[in-house]
Structure formats: structure tokens, C-alpha cells
Image (cartoon, rainbow, N blue to C red):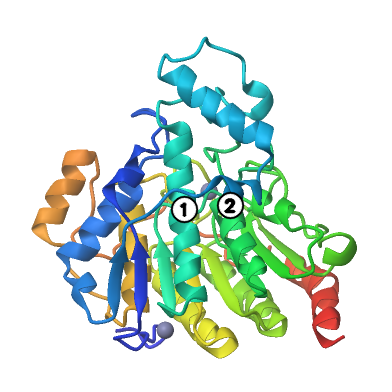
């Protein structure tokens, strides 16, 4: 094991909210978002035997209720999603729902659209409730992480915003939340949901919106009104890699979460910052993810008695990189040494059958097409954040 990866203590209560029916959230075989990203992750963790440990409980997901959806989305939008589902099933006359972002190339209509989106949202809420009701110290909703959905608009492959819906449940229970989003895309929907809310810290580290969807997430977006100083954005230059991301973690993310002193931590853990991801232009490696897991695990135990809800997110190499990165992340959290782990033959076969071409070792990385840029371009960005957004947050936390 490398010295920088300190495993979590085994035996902690860890709830995984998961069921195969979550895979009904599918825009079709040619769409970039594929359920295999988490199906093959669960398969790999199972094949390695890492989910047999004491303390790990599986819970079947349930649907988010209408009132849970209404905490985040407008009623007309939810009706439009239901209408889109009925149209896709041939039960209603076709109608143009593009005003709601539905029926677009990113979010085409499909037969289970409302039900499947309500299910992944319910799964993430259930993970949150496992923490609130003290059934678990850590919880994981692998199919969650749909951070682009807005109040009345589907966006970027996301229909309902499960992180925002889970945060709303925590707020209702009187808890203070820190949300940290590691997806390569800006967590715009979650940020917008709580932009004026002083009870939720939203942090997003992502490829700069100058180069990547959704185009937002500038350093100057720091929250508004009562919520000013409770929002941080770290836009990364193209080809930023592990070193830059960990540097940002040290200088901005960790001090922000510590100062915020949340009751619980929620991380959107998309792994599309990997250099092989076909949709983005960052240069992370698989080795980043166990490092992040170890640091976040320590941070959760130091700042909020461990209470940490992990949700999925992007990962557009769903048969190889995404399941390996998430397995390394969750394995580290479970206290497994992840270095030098050979991938089991049955999993290699499943990955290849789906279209993957994985290397023989969990953390192995093929040479990137473009070398990581190091963190020299990030220095001025972090300087600016320290002077502005982080300074406001620290002043607010002290006040
Ligand atoms: Zn722990
Ligand atoms: Zn993404």
C-alpha cells in the first residue's frame, strides 16, 4: 500500500442503496450515460469479495415521493416528465417538451423516464436517511449524482436532481450540509438550488466552463443574499491532473469544509476527470480516486463524526475506467489495500463482453494522450479563490 492512502477502519456501518432496477434509467444504447458504470462497479466489488465485510448493509431503493420531488422541482416540470414517459410508452400524443429540456439529444424521452428518475432520487434520499436515522456512518447511492437537473428543466443527462432532493431532506431535519462535487462538469443544478441558502455549502471542482458544459462555475460565483459566502467554485484548466486536484483539495476544499463545520458531508463522486474520459479534457488517473477517498474519509470523521453520503455521477468509459476508479474509491473507504490488486477473471470477461478493454491491475493506467499540465496554471486561480470566495466563507464561519 502506498503511504498516502490510509484505509478507513473496517466494520463501520456502511449502507449501500442499490438494486438492478436502477438500470431502467437509460437513454438507450448509443447515449453516453450508461448504467454499466455502476453495474460493473458493483460486480467488481462483489467479485473481489470486498462487500462481504461486517457492517455493510444493502438496502433496496424506493421511489422519491411527490413531496420529496417538489422540494426541488416545480409541479409543472414533474408533470412534463410524467407526460414524456407516457409519450415514450405510446400512451399519449407526442408533444414538444423541449421547454423543459425534455426530448432533446442530451435528455431524450424514454419509457421509464419519470419512474426511473424518481427511483435514483429515492435511493439517494434513502442514503441520506440512513445517516439521519443513524443506521449508518457512511452511505453510498451509486446511481445518484444527477447534479445538472434544475427546478424546471432537465439538463446534461439529468432529470431529477437527487443530491438537491437529499440535501432538502437533511435541511428539513435541521442539519447543516457540506456538498462537494468532484465531477468534471460544474455542479450547476445543486449550486442553483441553494445559491441563496445559508445552510448549505456547495463546492464544485470541475473543468472550466470556458471549455466544457454547462459553461458555469466561475470563481466569482460565491452565492447570493443570505447564501453569499456559502458557495465555492474551482474551475480547472484543461489537462489538470491528480497533482492539481489534490493541491486544490489541500488549499481550498479541506479548509472550506472544516470551517463550515457541517453535520454531514455529501460528495458527488463523478470520475469523468480521468484522462481517458471521452467527454472531458482533464488528465486525472485512476490513482487519484483512492487518494481522494482517504482524504475525504479523514475529513468526514474530523468534521462531522464520519457522516458521509457518497453519490455517483459522470463516468463515460463505463466498462473499464469508471468501475475501476469507483472500486478503488469504495475499497479505500472500506479499508482494503487497493494497490497491486489484480482484476478477477470473471470481471475481466464481463467488462470485455460489454465493450471494455481493461488492464490486468485495478490501478493501472494507460499512457494519457496528453500529459497532465501540472498545477502551475492553477496557482493563480487558487490565489484568487483564497482572496475572495474562501475569505468570505472563513469570515462567515467565524462570524
Ligand atoms: Zn469511516
Ligand atoms: Zn460529468
Residue name at image x 46 percent, y 32 percent = 113
Residue name at image x 54 percent, y 56 percent = 183
| Label annotation for residue 68 | 2
| Res. 284 visible in picture | no
Left or right of 121? Residue 172 is right
Dot 1 corresponds to which residue? 122
The numbered mark, 2 or 1, whose residue comes first in the sequence reads 2
Q: Residue 217's x, y, as percent?
A: 72, 53
Q: Are marks 2 and 1 in contact (CB under 8 Å)?
A: yes
Residue name at image x 53 percent, y 82 percent = 300
Secondary structure at numbered mark 2: helix
Relative to 196, is 149 above or below? above
Left or right of 172? Residue 389 is right
| Res. 394 visible in picture | yes
- Using the rendered view, name the quadrant where residue 4 is placed: bottom left
- Nearer to the camera, 47 or 12: 12
Q: CB at mark 2 closer than 8 A to ligand 2?
A: no
- Nearer to the camera, 241 or 185: 185
Relative to 240, is 4 above or below? below
Q: Quadrant of the C terminus?
A: bottom right
Real-space CA distance between mark 2 and mark 1, rounded to the nearest whole angstrom: 9 Å
Q: Residue 91's x, y, as percent?
A: 44, 15
Left or right of 350? Residue 115 is right
Q: Residue 229's x, y, as percent?
A: 82, 70
Name the residue at the top extreme: 93
Name the residue at the right extreme: 225
Amino acid at each position: 500500500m502506498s503511504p498516502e492512502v490510509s484505509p478507513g477502519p473496517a466494520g463501520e456501518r456502511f449502507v449501500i442503496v442499490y438494486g438492478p432496477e436502477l438500470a431502467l434509467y437509460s437513454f438507450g444504447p448509443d447515449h453516453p450515460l450508461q448504467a454499466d458504470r455502476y453495474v460493473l462497479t458493483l460486480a467488481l466489488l462483489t467479485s473481489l469479495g470486498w462487500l462481504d465485510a461486517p457492517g455493510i448493509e444493502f438496502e433496496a431503493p424506493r421511489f422519491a415521493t411527490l413531496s420529496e420531488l417538489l422540494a426541488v422541482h416545480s409541479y409543472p416540470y414533474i408533470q412534463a416528465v410524467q407526460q414524456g414517459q407516457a409519450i415514450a410508452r405510446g400512451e399519449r400524443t407526442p408533444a414538444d417538451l423541449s421547454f423543459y429540456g425534455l426530448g432533446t439529444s442530451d435528455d431524450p424521452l424514454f419509457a421509464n423516464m419519470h419512474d426511473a428518475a424518481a427511483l435514483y432520487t429515492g435511493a439517494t434520499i434513502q442514503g441520506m436517511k440512513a445517516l439521519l436515522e443513524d443506521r449508518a456512518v457512511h452511505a453510498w447511492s451509486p446511481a445518484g449524482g444527477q447534479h445538472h437537473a434544475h427546478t424546471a428543466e432537465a439538463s446534461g443527462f439529468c432529470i431529477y436532481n437527487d443530491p438537491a432532493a437529499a440535501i432538502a431532506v437533511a435541511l428539513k431535519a435541521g442539519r447543516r450540509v457540506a456538498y462537494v462535487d468532484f465531477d468534471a462538469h460544474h455542479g450547476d443544478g445543486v449550486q442553483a438550488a441553494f445559491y441563496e441558502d445559508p445552510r448549505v455549502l456547495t463546492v464544485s471542482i470541475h473543468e472550466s466552463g470556458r471549455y466544457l458544459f454547462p459553461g458555469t462555475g466561475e470563481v466569482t460565483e460565491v452565492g447570493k443574499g443570505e447564501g453569499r459566502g456559502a458557495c465555492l467554485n474551482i474551475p480547472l484548466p484543461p489537462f489538470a491532473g491528480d497533482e492539481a486536484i489534490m493541491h486544490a483539495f489541500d488549499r481550498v476544499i479541506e479548509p472550506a469544509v472544516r470551517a463550515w463545520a457541517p453535520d454531514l458531508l455529501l460528495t458527488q463522486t463523478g470520475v469523468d476527470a480521468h484522462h481517458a474520459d471521452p467527454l472531458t479534457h482533464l488528465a486525472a488517473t485512476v490513482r487519484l480516486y483512492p487518494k481522494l477517498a482517504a482524504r475525504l474519509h479523514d475529513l468526514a470523521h474530523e468534521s462531522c463524526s464520519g457522516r458521509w453520503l457518497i453519490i455517483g455521477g459522470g463516468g463515460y468509459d463505463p466498462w473499464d475506467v469508471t468501475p475501476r476508479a469507483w472500486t478503488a474509491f469504495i475499497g479505500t473507504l472500506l479499508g482494503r489495500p487497493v494497490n497491486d490488486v489484480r482484476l478477477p477473471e470473471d470481471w475481466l470477461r464481463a467488462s470485455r463482453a460489454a465493450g471494455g478493454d481493461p488492464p490486468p491491475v485495478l490501478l493501472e493506467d494507460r499512457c494519457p494522450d496528453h500529459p497532465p499540465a501540472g498545477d502551475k496554471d492553477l496557482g493563480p486561480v487558487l490565489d484568487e479563490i483564497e482572496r475572495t470566495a474562501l475569505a468570505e466563507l472563513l469570515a462567515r464561519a467565524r462570524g
